[in-house]
Amino acid sequence: MTDPEESALDSSEVIRAITELMLGEQPHLTRADVAEKSGVDPDIARERWRALGFPEADDEDAAFTEADVEALRLTQELIELGIIEADTEQAFIRTIGRSFARLADWQVRAFLGAMVSGSQEDVAAGDLAELAKVVPLGEKVQDYVWRRHLVNSATRLLLTDSDVDSATMCVGFADIVGYTRRSRQMKSNELTEMVERFEQVTAGLITDHHGRVVKTMGDEVMFVLDDPKEAAILALALLDEHEADDAFPELHIGMAFGNVQNHMGDVFGPVVNVASRLTSVARSGSALIDKAMADELRDDEDLRIKPLRRTSVKGYEHLQPWSLKRPKDTPASD
């Protein structure tokens, strides 16, 4: 049996090794040291640290490195250049923190699980040397993906002549039918496989139809597209997946069209709320759209749009859903 004190010592040594590898040195600076070196007010530095999602450190703790000083300097430079405005600073930093926290958690579990959970013998010099090779490669890939997405976002914004803060688009939600019930009956690995399959297929189809995944929430994906017809075709393609592959879960989909507010990669506004409400009342294997989107599609011969009975949902007493289907006798897409 492993001695608890020995395990604690092993874990401490592992953490020290990984910290030095990732940050270049062991923490040796206090909060006051960081503020003095960066020229950033200590209270502002504390706010930014918390917004990134990092655990609070006492004033006397030597919990920081030169990397923290440089990060504060760079952030301050972006603010002074006007890239980050004072009223959106906290939201900007929180968004970065949340995004990278999720990415880091996945990477640790995927790549470093054996190292973190193993014994001291498992964390040998060879393991750390291997990690030292992996980190720079991961940085290069992440930098490439970020730059490529910058190009895509800039292209989409310029070609659609949209306002930076708002745009007219289709917002959609696709939910797994009976997720709660199914999750109780499935083994953990089966549930993981189903969710992974759901995210993989939906993300691929959304991209293929010139859309963008806004976020995924386990059993639900939120997406946006500029073109109403393309959004309608996407919805039908998503529903077809269950018919073509039993392993892919059955979905119900809600979509709405109109002006939305863009904020830190997310979208907000009544159009988003309507799309969400329509998803909640859509039957298994069906897609519902709002009147604004129906008006855009009603004369399209490639689609079948039909008004349904008004319904009352949270925030909307007489919401008018429209069903979205293919014309009769039209086969599902391959």
Image (cartoon, grey):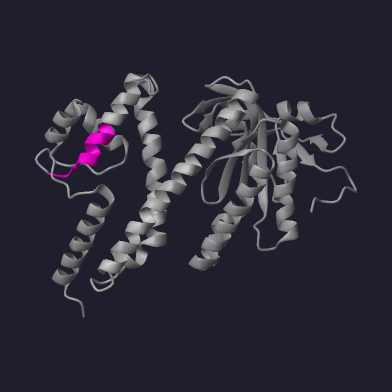
115 w.r.t. 161: above or below: below
| Quadrant (top left, top right, bottom left, bottom right) of the N terminus | bottom left
Nearest the viewer among 167 and 305 is: 167
Evaluate whether residue 259 shows in this view: no
Image location (x, y in percent) of residue 81: 36, 20
Q: Residue at x 63, y 49 (%)?
A: 204
Residue 110 falls within the magenta-colored stretch: no
Image location (x, y in percent) of residue 55: 24, 44
Image location (x, y in percent) of residue 129: 30, 62
Q: Is residue 80 left or right of residue 329?
A: left
331 w.r.t. 8: above or below: above
Evaluate whether residue 201 shows in this view: yes
Magenta-drawn segment: 62-72
| Quadrant (top left, top right, bottom left, bottom right) of the C terminus | bottom right
Q: Residue at x 23, y 62 (%)?
A: 14
Residue 63 falls within the magenta-colored stretch: yes
Image location (x, y in percent) of residue 8: 17, 65
Q: State the image quarter where residue 51 is shown.
A: top left
202 w.r.t. 47: above or below: below
Q: Residue at x 63, y 45 (%)?
A: 174
Q: Main structural element of the magenta stretch: helix, strand or loop?
A: helix
